[in-house]
Image (cartoon, rainbow, N blue to C red):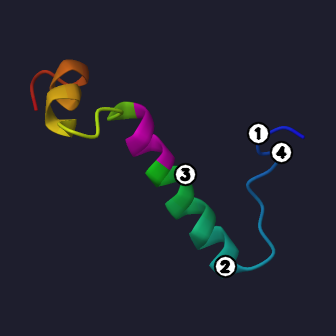
Amino acid sequence: MSDRLLSLKTKTPEEGFALAVSLAQKGVVVTQPNEKNPRKTATKIFPKC
């Protein structure tokens, strides 16, 4: 089975909220993979921050 989502539709608002939180957390992991120093990694991606 694939890890990809086929749809963003959920059965309940609560499931939709949980999905939104999960997607936001995944975005942080992708953009800040360096657990020891996330600011160092973020500075490489967003130099003017």
Residue 3 x/y as whole percent: 76, 41
Would you name the residue on which mark 4 appears?
A: 6
**SS for callout 4:** loop
Label 2 or label 3, whichever comes before in sequence order? 2
Residue range highlighted in magenta: 26-30
Q: Quadrant of residue 39?
A: top left
Is the C-beta separation of discs 2 and 3 under 8 Å? no
Which residue is found at the position 83% from the left and 45% from the top? 6
Q: Quadrant of the C terminus?
A: top left
Instruction: Say which amino acid is labelled 4.
Output: Leu
Instruction: Say which amino acid is labelled 1.
Output: Arg
Label 3 or label 4, whichever comes before in sequence order? 4
**SS for callout 3:** helix
Give the number of callouts: 4
Residue extending furthest left? 48
Distance in Å between CA atoms under marks 3 and 4 = 14 Å
Principal secondary structure, stretch drawn in magenta: helix
Would you name the residue on which mark 1 appears?
A: 4
Label 2 or label 4, whichever comes before in sequence order? 4
Seen in the picture, residue 38 relative to 41 is either above or below; the reply is below
Distance in Å between CA atoms under marks 2 and 4 = 18 Å
Distance in Å between CA atoms under marks 1 and 4 = 6 Å
Would you name the residue on which mark 3 appears?
A: 23
Is the C-beta separation of discs 1 and 4 under 8 Å? yes
Residue 24 x/y as whole percent: 46, 52
Would you name the residue on which mark 2 appears?
A: 13
**SS for callout 1:** loop
Q: Residues within 10 Å of mark 3 (few under 14, many from 20)?
A: few
Seen in the picture, residue 42 relative to 29 is either above or below; the reply is above
Which residue is found at the position 76% from the left and 39% from the top? 4
